[in-house]
Image: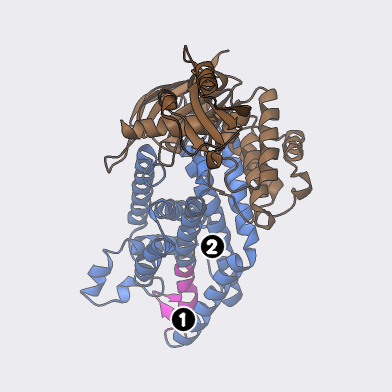
Chain colours: A brown, B blue
Amino acid sequence: MASIIEISGLTKRYASGFEALKGVDLTIEEGEIFALLGPNGAGKTTMISIICGIARATGGSVKVAGHDIVGDYRGARDAIGLVPQELSTDQFERVIDTVTFSRGLFGKPRNPAHIEKVLRDLSLWDKRNAKILELSGGMKRRVMIAKALSHEPRVLFLDEPTAGVDVELRRDMWKLIGELRETGVTIILTTHYIEEAEEMADRVGVINRGELMLVEDKAALMKKLGKKTLTVVLAERLAAVPAELAEWDVTLKGDGQEIEYIFDTQAERTGVSSLLRRLGDLGIGYKDLNTAQSSLEDIFVELVHQEKVA
Amino acid sequence: MSLSNLRAIAAIYKFELHRFRRTLLTGLLVPVITTTLYFVVFGGAIGSRMTEVDGIPYAAFIVPGLIMMAMFTESIFNASFGIYMPKFTGTIYELLSAPVSATETIIAYVGAAATKSLIIGTIIFVTAHLFVDVPVAHPFAMAGFMILIAISFCLFGFILGIWAQSFEQLQVIPMLLIMPMTFLGGAFYSVQMLAEPWRTITLFNPIVYLISGFRWTFFGKGDVAIEFSLIFVAGMLTVCLAIIGWMFRTGYRLKK
């Protein structure tokens, strides 16, 4: 796959001295869904704002579809569609007018068929003559996506696309993003909902305090950093963890009915079989075993926690 | 100057005029009613006591000043509001992220605001004819002067709109600076009627040169030579363009 966004040494320092981005390097492949995760103030929105032309970089360079965002801003911006975090709309405009306006703003000739397709895909066609102020929050979010798609961009930035929308709409949005990917649009998405990234992303980047801590294929990341939890449901309750199990660092749960053991799936020896053998040696019977994979959220929390400790 | 996205200019221009159409009633009626009131108060009440100024009937004498006053106000208001609202509502993100140059942005916003201002100026001119016979000595110069004034004050309004960070700031310069300067700039009287030192002091007011120049296009004479008026308009245009150019280059109050 060819790269569609190339970020090199990107820095942003505000007049106050605060460094929002500290030399970020990142390459986004064409056609992928890239999820950028990070806590509030990590630098996600700043990075997107710089790429899209809303904010200025202090240093470094960004190319979109081979066009430098400063030297050849028209070429770069022509390829970009942006859905910002805030619901910013012209409240008194009709849906169809505002979407048509966006297409014109990006220098594209009128194409009522495309506008109709975008509105239908987003379930907005029936509302095309409604004023934006008459729409619900979720509908307004869809209008913003329709505006971003009106000029047929190659890259779509979705900054917290499902913030404040209900579960049903969130599912619809995920479906829509999946469909967009099918058409070849590259999607870069920032989110607080880890499940969103877990559900959709091909690759995940974690940013914290202006530094890109890691960029990984989602599946590989979960495999590499993921931990599993083994829950042993005991035949009889235990009052305390026997001293003989100290080397496994197990925890007693469920009123003494369960033993929980967290192990690294990548370790040479996971310790699972030796733990079960030791339980047998100690005459501790068990009636069930469960394992659970840690989620992207657990990984994210751990990474951010490690950063804070460091 | 970069002008390759003409569709963007057309889109913004139409959007802005559409906003004007939404508020057509207040947008047109208010200046017409205000002008009529000025005619009643100044033309009727004062005009009955002061029949002529410099050989021109007083009611006709104030027409250029009234048109200029309305155009100053409307130009500043329309242009500043046009760029301030996207900043206020957050929709400015779309303009900043679109492949639109600073020149295209200015042409679109200032062009739309100037169009509205010219429509209002023309309506006031027509309204004035209902009250008094107003001769126009240099009709082409009059039209040209109106266009130049509309563009200059729209550029000034555009600067205000970028600079303003609240609705109060948006209002403060038109209300506290432009309006008093217009009243004291010879809209309703000739500077020649003032006694010294006020006459000399008044000549430091740049509005005097603008109203005088416009009055010259009607009656072939003004308080100052037409050349000075044109120099002032050209100066204002140049300064405003330079400031706007700097604002876009640095992203002043537009980009983070």
Residue A242 position, x and y percent, is 45, 30
Residue A38 position, x and y percent, is 45, 35
Q: Amino acid at mark 1?
A: Phe
Q: Which of marks 2 and 1 precedes in the sequence?
A: 1
Tell me where residue A254 sits by quadrant: top right
Q: Given the current orientation, which residue lies at the most extreme left position?
A: B197
Q: Given the current orientation, which residue lies at the most extreme right position?
A: A126
Mark 1 sits on what residue?
B42
Residue found at x 47% / y 11%: A268
Q: Residues within 10 Å of mark 2 (few under 14, many from 20)?
A: many
Mark 2 sits on what residue?
B121
Residue A249 visible (yes or no): yes
Residue B39 position, x and y percent, is 51, 78
The quadrant of the image that shows the N terminus of chain A is: top right
**Labels 1 and 2 within one chain:** yes
Name the foreground residue: A295 vs A64.
A295
- For residue B224, side relative to residue A202 (left or right): left
Q: Is residue B54 magenta?
A: yes
Residue found at x 30% / y 64%: B205
Q: Is residue A23 magenta?
A: no
- For residue A3, side relative to residue A145 (left or right): left
Residue B22 position, x and y percent, is 64, 60
The quadrant of the image that shows the C terminus of chain A is: top left
Spatial CA distance of label 1 from label 2 is 19 Å
Q: Residues within 10 Å of mark 1 (few under 14, many from 20)?
A: some
Name the foreground residue: B23 vs B66.
B23
Residue B126 visible (yes or no): no
Q: Are marks 1 and 2 in contact (CB under 8 Å)?
A: no
Per the rendered image, the range of residues in magenta is B50-66
Q: Amino acid at mark 2?
A: Gly
Name the foreground residue: B197 vs B69.
B69
